[in-house]
Structure formats: structure tokens, C-alpha cells
Image (tube, rainbow, N blue to C red):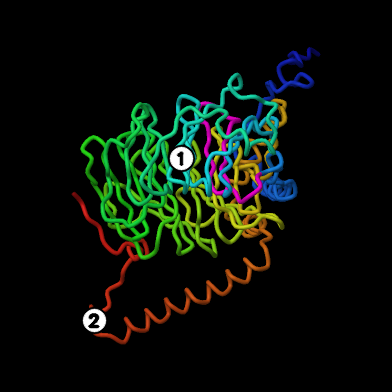
């Protein structure tokens, strides 16, 4: 009797130890894997629980902070670890995120430092209530590192490059992405040339006081401003005229341009919401970002344009997906007070916040993420878990665990009161529409309710 056998090498189907490359034959027919979905659901549930277990967003504070509240932050777009902050006593500090220590400190203004920006030439422009704009150098060769915090007030001119004198107190400042010019806000919107001592044009249109001015980072000739008359105005510096204007029900405190979609920007409002706008049609908003229970004081887009971070007077920071209406995460500490400024780092991995408890805090954008070096096996596992969580994100148990957050008792109570108030207003509006003549109470979409009027030059 003759027997024929199949002979093959084990190298074709036995994986090599401690490597990712395996030639295991696998039949992907779902009929052969009846328990695959159950196994993957269990893995997704476990991954969601582990994510919440290891969620530790707060990293620490920068140095010893300031002596007064921190009201402005500025990031260096040419570096991932350099930030500047300005406080209520007029002191500005330049920080290194790697060491979490300050590399330069300046006694910049008498009174509050109300505006701060880092120029493309790696210098700082600051403005304040003392009607002055100052240009500072943060070059380590020009700055004496031996100067201590107590000596800032005596060495006022160290690092000072140039001073511009204005006619009124300034409330905001921003630098052009390429050209040597900057724009300031206050009683007027003024366009300045770095090589001249006086402003070169006045762009104001209607507002008594301008809170914020921002250059578009892509369409660099467009400037957006928010005013005390609840207006949002867009200007074109090539023609020195306003091109778009929208008036909202409440005042806008801050503004930020989408770095990738040049025509979109977001504003933070006094009515506890942030609004996404399209500069081509400002008769309605593109999106409304809810969940805060107090005025939004600052807002910033991530470098990818996919997320925004908001800092609020309710002492919390919230992170939103730019296409979602509710926050995906909320950050807070027991000691953090009203948040006046928030910024993404240029690599979108960290968030900085400044509050009036004098501290500058650094947070992780993704609470459970860690910055240590990961092996290929670990990275593949994390990517696999992310895909599983995305696949099963709408399952009730996974959705409940992923959404659950502990919030301060004051915020929790305010959320309940606000929810009751909103439901009451909607119910009253529905009752009025139901018992009125047909067409006399038209339904107004929520994204249009905020806009009271628009104007185009």
C-alpha cells in the first residue's frame, strides 16, 4: 500500500516570534466566524473602559505662573514648544513647553496686557491699556537670563525693540502672516506698518469698541473683528473697506479662523454658545457649539481644523469636533478659576489655558494619550482599539461609558436649570404657534435665530 503525504514548511504558516509579519492563512468568510462580532464588541467595551480609566488630561502648570490673572496667550507658529502669555499686571512671559519654564519675562505695560502675538520674525508684539504697542525680542543672546522675576519691574527696557504710541487703549492685536504689518482693535481698528511709527489706515465701521481682531491665515488680506455692538465685521485691507457685517443677539468675545478652510471661522458668544460661520453667507451660522453654562471667553481652532477648544467663565474647558454640536470632553480642576484664554499647540497634541488664578496650565488634547515612545505592536493595538470604538460607538453601553464625565457641582446644577429654561421657552413658542393664525408665527431655524441682521458693502 502506498501513502502520499503533503509536505510543507512551517515557516509559511507559523509566525516568527516577536514580529508583526505573519503569513497565517485566514479565511475571511463571515460564516466561518460566527462569534467574531461578539468578540469585537467585548474588545470595544474593554477598550472604552480602559480609555476612561487612563484619562488624565491635566499635565501641569508652566513655571510659577504670573502674579496676576492670565488674560492673553500667543503661540509661535514656527515651533511646537514656545508660547507667550500676558497678565493683568502688564507682565508678559515667554515659555518653553519642554522645560515648562519661562525663557524671558518683560514688564511690558502699565495696567492690563490686553493683546499679544508672536510675529513670523520670532518677535512679540504686545498692547495694553496704557495706549502703547511694544515689539519685544525673545532671542536668548539679547536677553539676560540672570534677570529674575523681582527685577522685571526695574529692567523695563530689556528686550524692547520698538514702541508704537496710540491714541486710545488697545483691546486686541494680530500680525499678518507674511507682510510686516499688524492690526489693532480698541476704539478703532487700525492697520500698522512695522516700519512706521503711526498707523497707516483706519478700518472702523460702526462699533464703539472692538474686542478682537484676527487676520485670516490663508486669505491673508481678510481681517475679522468683533465689537461691543454685537457685530462681526470682515475687512479687506487691500481696499480698506468692510466687506461683510453681521449683528448677533449677544456680544461676541473672541474669534478664530479655520486654518484649512479659509472661509470658515468660529466665534465665542455671551449666550454660552460658540458659532461656526461662513464668511460668504453670514445670514445664518453653520453650526452651534453648546454645553457651556457661562460666557465663552476664548476659542481656538486646532491646526487640523477638525476640532475647536473653548474656555469659559464657568471655569471649564471644552473640546468640540468642528462638525458636532456638543463637546466630546470637558476639562476642569478644583483650583482653576474663570478661563480667559485657550490655545492649541501647533502639533495639536496639547492645549494651553490661562485663567485669573494666575496659572498657565497645559492639558492633553486626548485625555488618555501618552507621549512616550510606543512599539509597533502597541501602536497597532491602539489603532485597532480606536477602530473598534468607532465601529461600536452607538451601542448603548459603550456610548454611556464614553460620554460619562464628572463635572463640578455648580456646573451640573447650572446645566439642569438651563435645560429647564430652554425646554420652557420651546414649549411656549410651540404653544403660541399652535394657537395663532396659520403663518403668523413662522418657524425660525435655530441657526438663524442668533443673527439679527447682515450688511454687505
Q: Position of residue 434 (x, y in %)?
A: 33, 83
Q: Position of residue 137 (x, y in %)?
A: 53, 27
- The image quadrant of residue 241 is top left
**N-term mark: 2 or 1:** 1
State which region is magenta.
66-87
> Which residue does the numbered mark 2 point to in the structure image?
438
Disc 2 to disc 1, how far (Cα)?
43 Å
Q: Position of residue 336 (x, y in %)?
A: 67, 55
Q: Which quarter of the rendered picture does the N terminus lie within? A: top right
Observer-nearest of 20 and 253: 253
Q: Is residue 91 above or below residue 16?
A: below
Whether residue 346 sits left or right of residue 216 in the image: it is right
- The image quadrant of residue 436 is bottom left
Whether residue 294 sits left or right of residue 152 in the image: it is left
Element carrying mark 2: loop
Residue at the left extreme, as displayed: 457
Mark closer to the observer (2, 1): 1
Q: Residue at x 49, y 36 (%)?
A: 303
Element carrying mark 1: loop
Q: Is residue 232 above or below residue 371?
A: below
> Which residue does the numbered mark 1 point to in the structure image?
305
Whether residue 410 sits left or right of residue 77 in the image: it is right
Is 83 covered by the magenta stretch?
Answer: yes
Amino acid at each position: 500500500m502506498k501513502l502520499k503525504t503533503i509536505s510543507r514548511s512551517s515557516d509559511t504558516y507559523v509566525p516568527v516570534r516577536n514580529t508583526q509579519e505573519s503569513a497565517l492563512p485566514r479565511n475571511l468568510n463571515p460564516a466561518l466566524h460566527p462569534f467574531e462580532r461578539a468578540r469585537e464588541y467585548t474588545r470595544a467595551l474593554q477598550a472604552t473602559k480602559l480609555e476612561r480609566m487612563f484619562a488624565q488630561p491635566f499635565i501641569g502648570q508652566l513655571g510659577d505662573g504670573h502674579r496676576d490673572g492670565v488674560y492673553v496667550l500667543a503661540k509661535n507658529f514656527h515651533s511646537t514648544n514656545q508660547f507667550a502669555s500676558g497678565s493683568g499686571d502688564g507682565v508678559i512671559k515667554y515659555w518653553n513647553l519642554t522645560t515648562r519654564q519661562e525663557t524671558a519675562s518683560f514688564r511690558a505695560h502699565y495696567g492690563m496686557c490686553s493683546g499679544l502675538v508672536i510675529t513670523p520674525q520670532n518677535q512679540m508684539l504686545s498692547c495694553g491699556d496704557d495706549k502703547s504697542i511694544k515689539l519685544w525680542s525673545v532671542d536668548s543672546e539679547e536677553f539676560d537670563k540672570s534677570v529674575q522675576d523681582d527685577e522685571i519691574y526695574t529692567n523695563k527696557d530689556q528686550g524692547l525693540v520698538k514702541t508704537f504710541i496710540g491714541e486710545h487703549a488697545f483691546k486686541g492685536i494680530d500680525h499678518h502672516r507674511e507682510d510686516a504689518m499688524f492690526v489693532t482693535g480698541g476704539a478703532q481698528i487700525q492697520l500698522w506698518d512695522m516700519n512706521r511709527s503711526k498707523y497707516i489706515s483706519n478700518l472702523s465701521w460702526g462699533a464703539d469698541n472692538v474686542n478682537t481682531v484676527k487676520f485670516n491665515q490663508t486669505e491673508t488680506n481678510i481681517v475679522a473683528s468683533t465689537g461691543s455692538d454685537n457685530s462681526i465685521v470682515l475687512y479687506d485691507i487691500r481696499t480698506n473697506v468692510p466687506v461683510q457685517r453681521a449683528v448677533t443677539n449677544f456680544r461676541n468675545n473672541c474669534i478664530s479662523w479655520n486654518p484649512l478652510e479659509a472661509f470658515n471661522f468660529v466665534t465665542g458668544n455671551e449666550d454660552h454658545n460658540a458659532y461656526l460661520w461662513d464668511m460668504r453667507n453670514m445670514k445664518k451660522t453653520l453650526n452651534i457649539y453648546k454645553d457651556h453654562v457661562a460666557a465663552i471667553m476664548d476659542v481656538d481652532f486646532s491646526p487640523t481644523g477638525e476640532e475647536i477648544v473653548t474656555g469659559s467663565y464657568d471655569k471649564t474647558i471644552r473640546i468640540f469636533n468642528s462638525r458636532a454640536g456638543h463637546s466630546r470632553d470637558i476639562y476642569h480642576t478644583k483650583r482653576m478659576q474663570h478661563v480667559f484664554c485657550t490655545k492649541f499647540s501647533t502639533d495639536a497634541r496639547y492645549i494651553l489655558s490661562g485663567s485669573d488664578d494666575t496659572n498657565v496650565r497645559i492639558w492633553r488634547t486626548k485625555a488618555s494619550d501618552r507621549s512616550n515612545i510606543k512599539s509597533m505592536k502597541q501602536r497597532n493595538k491602539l489603532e485597532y482599539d480606536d477602530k473598534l470604538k468607532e465601529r461600536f460607538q452607538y451601542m448603548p453601553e459603550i456610548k454611556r461609558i464614553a460620554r460619562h464625565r464628572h463635572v463640578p457641582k455648580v456646573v451640573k446644577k447650572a446645566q439642569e436649570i438651563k435645560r429647564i429654561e430652554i425646554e420652557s421657552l420651546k414649549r411656549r413658542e410651540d404653544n403660541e404657534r399652535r394657537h395663532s393664525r396659520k403663518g403668523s408665527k413662522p418657524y425660525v431655524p435655530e441657526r438663524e435665530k442668533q443673527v439679527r441682521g447682515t450688511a454687505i458693502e
